[in-house]
Image (spheres, rainbow, N blue to C red):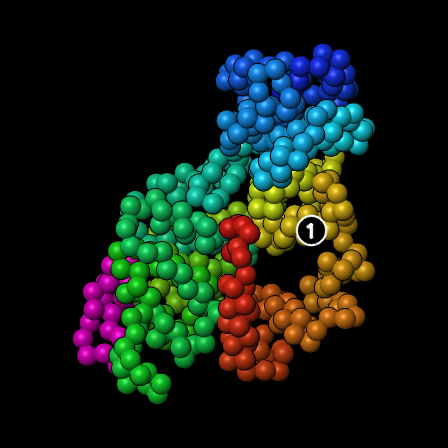
Amino acid sequence: MAFVNEPSVLLVDDDSDFCSWFTQRGRDAHCEVTCASTLEAARLVATGQSFDLYVVETSLSDGNGMDLLDELGERVQGGAVVTASPTFRNVLRAIRGPAIDYFVKPLADESIGALFRGAHSSARSREAQQHSRRLGEMLGSSKAMLRLFDSIGKVAPLDASVLLHGESGTGKELAARALHDLSGRHGRFVALNCGAIAPELLASQLFGHERGAFTGAQQAHAGLFEQAKGGTLFLDEITEMPPVLQVFLLRVLETRSLCRVGGPHDIGVDARIIAACNRHPAQAVRDGRLRGDLYYRLMEFPLVIPPLRERREDIPLLALHFLQSLNERYGTRRQFADGTLRHLADQPWPGNVRELRHAVQRHYILADSDVVTVRPQRVDDAADRVVDDGESDTIFFAVGMTFAEVEREMLLRTLALCNENKRAAADKLGVTPKTVYNRLSRYRSLESRKPRDFLFGT
């Protein structure tokens, strides 16, 4: 991603010698510096222009430069205090502020270099946002994503069933949520991963049950169809639903009614259905994983979510977004090292947006300074404890991994090798399908307890 405009910096300081020196250093760093000697002059300049970095002195003839940062609020992408008169009160104020750096004059080379690198980072983020489009939590400027956004906008207000097809990690649930948000429906968005629920429990989860319908059913339970009344029911991994339940699902879609397990009568259904799968739906029909009649019923409007390798121009945009989200969460101002965005755009990303998000987060954590560098994966990298050697059926495990970690990675990789066919994976691993379902359910439960740093993925 190329950026043609130099970062803009506003320096608010009444020391003319410092302003001249700072401006020259800014030119050397390819930054455009605007100087204001008073708080009032700075307010006038900031009214008509936004800057990538605001550098203020606390002791001005007409006030404290930090007041400008408070007044601008969210407009400040990057702010710093550079003062010759440090006070405990101002230091405390800076610490409590939104990621404001505090420096005491004279500035060291490392400090001023960090300031101008921050300006470049803010400029990249600002320009990326100007050239991007967003729909819900999805972000992109590529032709493939713009076409997807347009299709979602057209079908969202309608009652047509939608079938989302895309590789793992492309953002199918985000697309489903965008469809719901734009639909005008006032009910809930309810999601179910059909592959994470044991088959014998799936009917009860979907359609609900009456008290006493089976052992353990001590009270009546409203299924997800009822919970999504007036809203949207998202069925992920629809090809993992047992064929016998697909028959019942088809009946619900056609009659707009259902009968709870053990129930005496039908209940009306008012839920918009969105389904998704990461295998090609037509191939799933040929393989017997998806009933043909259900396939055509869901295919009222198909949507393909493009993999990241087909929208490489979005990779720098997404990486900057993930890094900015981490900075906002943890009160930091970290930035990518030179060349990192180009390096990221050249990677294959078989895990798509989810893999890119995890990579940015991992290297953010590993960074020893405010500069985030993406390193090639190595077997001895503590952050990459499971290393793929390039073959889809081989994994190297690092010494020190727990048995639970080994089990999890082996199960997930075997599932990937079997195209997410849980029964085939169970046969290869020498366990029952129920064991596979139970393990996946446990993994999903553990993940749901973690804070969601980002919403990209699925």
Where 152 falls versus 25 (above or below)?
A: below
Q: Give me the residue at 40% from left, 61% from top.
A: 191
Left or right, residue 29 beside residue 313: right
**Residue 325 x/y as whole percent:** 57, 44
Image point 20% across, 69% down: which residue?
267
In the rendered view, tell whether residue 58 sits above or below residue 345: above
| Residue 261 sits inside the magenta stretch | yes
**Front in this rendered view, residue 258 or 192:** 192
Q: Residue furthest bottom?
A: 215
Provide the secondary structure element on which disc 1 rests: helix
Q: Is residue 314 visible?
A: no
Crowdedness near tag 1: few (<14), some (14–19) or many (≥20) residues, C-alpha within 10 Å: few
- Which of the 4 quarters of the picture holds residue 64? top right
Query: Which residue was labeled with disc 1?
Result: 365
Please provide the residue range marked out in magenta. Answer: 251-271
Query: How many discs appear?
Result: 1
Q: Nearer the viewer, residue 62 or 273?
A: 62
At 69% from the left edge and 63% from the top edge, which residue is drawn? Answer: 392
Residue 437 included in the magenta stretch of the image: no
What's the residue type where badge 1 is placed?
A: Ile
Residues 311 and 76: in front is 76
Q: Is residue 66 above or below residue 295?
A: above
Q: Is residue 40 something that shows in the picture?
A: yes
Percent across and percent down for residue 159 are: 28, 51
Seen in the picture, residue 240 relative to 60 is either above or below; the reply is below
Relative image position of residue 304 (x, y in whole percent): 47, 49
- Residue 15, image quadrant: top right
Residue lying at the far left in this picture: please name it: 265
Which of the 4 quarters of the picture holds residue 371?
A: top right
Q: Quadrant of the N terminus?
A: top right
Residue 420 point in image, percent of width and height: 55, 67
